[in-house]
Structure formats: C-alpha cells, structure tokens
Amino acid sequence: MAKAIRQMEENVHLVDIVFELVDARIPAASRNPEVSRISRDKPHLIILTKKDLADSQQTAAWLNAYRAQNIPAIAIDSRANVTPKQITNLALKILGDKLAAEKAKGLKERPVRAMTVGVPNVGKSTLLNHLVQRRAAQVGNTPGVTKGQQWLRSSKHLELLDTPGILWPKFKDQETAQKLALTGAIKEKLYAKDDVALFALHFFRQYHLPELEQRYRLTAADRELSDVDLLLKITANLGMRDDYERASERVILDARRQKLGGFTLDRAPQKEATDHDPEKA
Ligand SMILES: Nc1nc2c(ncn2[C@@H]2O[C@H](COP(=O)(O)OP(=O)(O)OP(=O)(O)O)[C@@H](O)[C@H]2O)c(=O)[nH]1
C-alpha cells in the first residue's frame, strides 16, 4: 500500500484530472482520505461504480448531493452501460477552461490525462477495459488484482493512468472497515466473518427486512431477537446446525450477490442538509 501511495504522489502532477472510483454501495466509506490528500489540487470526477448492486434511490440521492456541492459525479454499472464517449465528454467539460486557455495560447490539441484511483475491487480495471475497448487491465473478483501502474490510451482525447487499489493503513473506525469488508474491498483473511455478518444483519433488518425474512425464512416473532440470536436462527434455518461461521459467510455472499436486494450502506446526505441546493436557488 505504501508503494502504491508513493507512486500516486510521484505521478499526480502528470495528470489533468483524477477519476475517483467509489463503490455506489459505500460512497463515503470507499473514499480514501489518502487519495483526497494527494490529489486535492486536481479536478475530480467521482465515478460511483456497481450501481447495479446499490439501492437506486440512494444512488440518485447521492448524485443530487454531489450536484448540490458542485462535485462532478456519475453512477455506472461498469459491466454494462459505460461508453468511453460519456466519460471522455465529462472530463472534457470539467477541464473546459483549462483546455480553452491552452488553445488560446496556441498550444497543440492534446489528450486529457486522467488518473484512476479507488479502493481495491471497486471496478477500476473493468472500467478501464471499457474505456480502452480491450482487455488491458486484469479483472478479478478479489481485492488486489492490479499490481502496478500503467498508461492506457482510450482515444485521441483521453489517456488513463491505472493504479493499484489503495486502502488506508488505519481505518477511520470499525464501521468503515465492516462496510469495506462486506462489499469486498478487504481480503477475506483480514476480517472476522461473523462480525461482518452481524453488521450486515443489523443493516438489512433496518432497511431491507422483507428481503431478509424471505431469504432466510424468518417470521415476525424473530424480529424480537438480538442480532447474535438472529444469526443463530439463520444458521439453523439454513440447516447448518451450529456452524455460524459458515452461515456468516453465506450471509456475506448473499448480500454481495444481491440476494437481499440492491443496498447502500452509506445513506445519502439528506436534502435539507446540503447548503447549496440549486433547486432552492
Ligand atoms: N455488478 C458489478 N460488478 C462489477 C462492476 N464493476 C466491476 N465489477 C466486478 O467487480 C470485481 C472487481 O473488478 P476489478 O475491475 O478487477 O476491480 P479493481 O478495482 O481493478 O480491483 P483491484 O485490482 O483490486 O484494484 C470483478 O468481479 C468485476 O467483474 C459493476 O459496475 N457492477
């Protein structure tokens, strides 16, 4: 991780814009404070990835919140709906003044250079492969597949610097770590599955109770149980006797595979909480 951060620090001056990929299910927890620190002088485009796995109402609310703060942002399903033109045009729009100034000085037209950053497994390689329209970056369903940095050419308008996923050395708090673990940004051996499953159950009880009850054949009476007792009940209902570790793993995988519905762990800021709401102006 230290090497990845150093590489980013060394190269940030080479780019015009930072494409900051954040997981649409955890738009707050997957924003890396190190990335903000290193690239604070550069324009940013926030790209919410995996929107197909998130709660669509929450994603819309997050996009509204970014808009209200004049932060350029877009939500994508990297596997389906990304067109290189869409992202390129956004980058060109964000950098419009800078490019116009260069043109006015008589400088030759050149591609925009973008650095893509994000936590492990957020979908950087998948997006990059779309943007360059070939399999240039390695994709894998485990965190840490991308190892080094590489420049990729999307078109004559856009060049991209791929970077390995960066997690930060100390998580802000335990909850951030649970969110990153549940969505797959942290290597499996680094977290306790039962802790993450309990965190998931607590969340799904609050926001997706019908899906949870249906998936694990729970009844209204089970609503009174503590989270720990609920996990034990689910373990029994899954026919796993008292193997709550295995049941925990199942809950985590079910959540990731959308068996409990699209979900967003970080709730979007409430509309009234945003100071510069253009709709009110
Ligand atoms: N459902 C869904 N899956 C996605 C999306 N984007 C990427 N994935 C999947 O997420 C997993 C990780 O994607 P990668 O592109 O390898 O992620 P990465 O950020 O390059 O990962 P590192 O190499 O760890 O930095 C893969 O299984 C992808 O197929 C998306 O928008 N929706």
Image (cartoon, grey):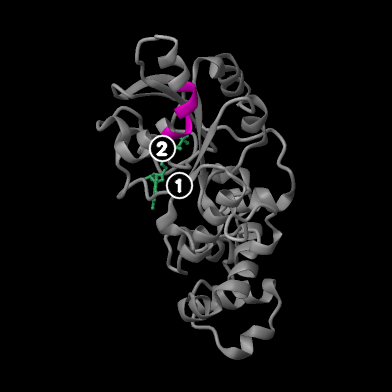
**Residue receiving disc 1:** 74
- Say whether residue 97 is magenta: yes
The reply to whether residue 148 is in sight is: no
Q: Amino acid at mark 2?
A: Leu
The reply to whether residue 75 is in sight is: yes
Left or right: where does residue 206 sit relative to residue 124?
right
The segment highlighted magenta reads 93-99
Seen as rendered, the residue at the extreme bottom is 221
- Screen quadrant of the N terminus: top right
Q: Is residue 163 above or below residue 254?
A: above
Category of crowding for the residue at label 2, using alpha-carbon neighbours closer than 10 angstroms: few (below 14), some (14–19), many (at least 20): some
Q: Is residue 141 above or below residue 94?
A: below
User: Residue at 34% across / 15% down in the picture?
Assistant: 109
User: Which one is in front, 52 or 166?
Assistant: 52
Left or right: where does residue 61 sit relative to residue 195?
left
Q: Secondary structure at mark 1?
A: strand
Residue 90, label in figure:
2
